[in-house]
Image: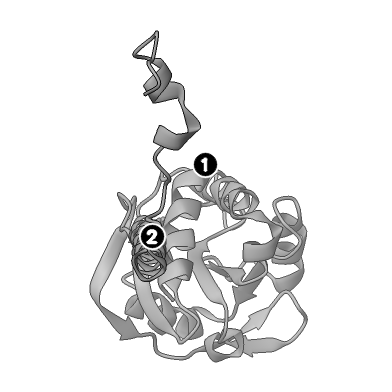
Amino acid sequence: MTELNNPLEAIDSPQSTNTSLPSNPALRGYTRRLMWVGAFLVVVILAAAAAWWYLLPPTLHGMPLQSPRAADDFTLTTTTGKSMSLSDFRGKYVVLFFGYTYCPDVCPTTLGDLQQMLKQLGAKRAEDVQVLFVTVDPERDTAQQLATYLHYFDPNFIGMTGTVAEIQPVAKQFGIFFEKEPSSDKSNYVVDHTAVITIIDPKGYVREIFNYGVPGADMASDVAYLMRRG
């Protein structure tokens, strides 16, 4: 009978080492299957958590429509040199804003925010967005005037103009009010107008409205969320 001088030698001895898997082949195969099932479940749980986080509604910065409505189609003269309709932009997210080039503050500030919105979205996603600027001052805002003005912000912005009679029903359907203030100077006057931004999805449905003053980064966050949801 062999004596152990040190009881710890029994633990260190190779004969006493436990294997990670049972020695029985059938039991060993069953254990392996359990390990694979466990690993698979972990992957599924992680994937589900990632999907949940990806689709989780963020804190939106605009006013989403709980029941999106289809926007009525309209046609106006554009800075592209031809008349275009809202339906021509199917497949893109249309960012619609009503203003005028002689606007002293609200319009240039908003256009600057829209410029930042596209920058925050990144070149790839920005390809699926079209900014439309509809004038509320057609007397001064010719297609050429709009083209020159909008180019300072982004050459891809499209301006739209027409007669007051053509623009009024377009503005009305999006809740836009505009009115020229009385002035003795026919070339220098102010136009009061509603300063909101309307987001229309690729299928032509109004999805969200931004009030004046929402930063470009916040608008980009909301538009990116709409894109993810489809």
The foreground one among 178 and 23 is: 23
Q: Is residue 101 visible?
A: yes
Q: Residue furthest top?
A: 5
Q: Quadrant of residue 171?
A: bottom left
Q: Residue furthest left?
A: 66
The foreground one among 168 and 147 is: 147
Whether label 1 touches label 2, CB < 8 Å: no
On the image, the x and y values in percent for residue 106 come to 48, 46
Residue 35 badge: 2
Q: CA distance from mark 1 to mark 2?
A: 65 Å
**Residue type at mark 1?**
Asp
Residue 193 badge: none
Q: Is residue 118 above or below residue 124?
A: above
Q: Quadrant of residue 5?
A: top left
On the image, the x and y values in percent for residue 229 come to 40, 71
Taking the spot 54% from the left edge, 90% from the top edge, the residue there is: 87
Taking the spot 41% from the left edge, 45% from the top edge, the residue there is: 214
Which residue is under mark 1?
Answer: 105
Q: Secondary structure at mark 1?
A: loop
| Crowding at mark 2 (Cα within 10 Å: few <14, some 14-19, many 20+) | few
| Crowding at mark 1 (Cα within 10 Å: few <14, some 14-19, many 20+) | few
Horizontal side of residue 30 vs 151, given as left or right: left
